[in-house]
Amino acid sequence: MKKIAFFIVLLLSVTSCVSTKSTLKNVDDNAPDLVLKKDNTFVINQFAKDKKYGYDPDYPVNIFFQNTNNEALNESRFLNALAGPSGEKITYTKLETCCPFPTKRSNMGAGFLNVYELKWEGQKKPIKLYLNVYEKGILMVPMGLRLKQN
């Protein structure tokens, strides 16, 4: 009897950790496909008006581009298009992978967000951006950043 009770408690605790509903708020499967510029960065024509865009795990920058076989390449295509608030050159480092969510665009049935730290000269505190290579959305420049001038 104790083994059955233990098994039931174990089963409940494991299944309670798995969510089948995504918490992502800005997925848009009807968003236009991403386009590359000659310098191998993504074309970005819009600036975010929501301060959560990119800075909150529920509002990541969705950079799905054809496939997810090379997520680092697609992330650099986005990040290399950005500049600091006054046009400063940014540097970035991948900090971690977090925040699992269900997706049909992964053979595992789940996707993860990649968290990047962005720095530039004169900055008081580095910023963190959440990037999602599994889902589509309107690609925008997060608040407080600019497009890099070529």
Image (cartoon, grey):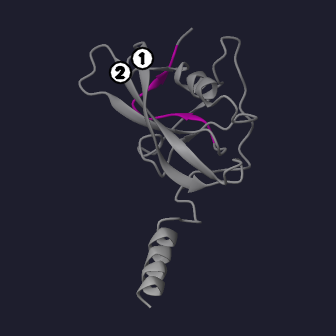
| Amino acid on which the number 2 mark rests in the picture | Lys
Instruction: Locate the C terminus and report the quarter of the image it occupies.
Output: top right
Where does the magenta region start and end? 138-148
Of helix, strand and loop, which one carries label 1? Answer: strand
Nearest to N terminus: mark 2 or mark 1: 1
State the image coordinates of residue 81 (x, y, percent, origin top left).
55, 20
Q: Which residue is mark 2?
A: 119
Q: Main secondary structure of the magenta part?
A: loop
Q: Is residue 105 left or right of residue 49?
A: right
Magenta stretch contains residue 98: no
- Give the crowd class for mark 2: few <14, some 14-19, many >=20 residues within 10 Å: many
Q: Residue at x 48, y 69 (%)?
A: 14
In which quarter of the view is residue 46 placed?
Answer: top right
Q: Residue at x 31, y 27 (%)?
A: 126
Q: Residue at x 26, y 27 (%)?
A: 125
Instruction: Locate the N terminus and report the quarter of the image it occupies.
Output: bottom left
Q: Real-space Cα distance between discs 2 and 1?
A: 6 Å
Q: Nearer the viewer, residue 127 or 12?
A: 12
Against 98, residue 87 (above or below) is: above
Against 2, residue 23 (above or below) is: above
Q: Which residue is mark 1?
A: 90
Q: Are marks 2 and 1 in contact (CB under 8 Å)?
A: yes
In this view, which residue lies farthest toward the top? Answer: 150
Q: From this viewpoint, is residue 32 visible?
A: yes
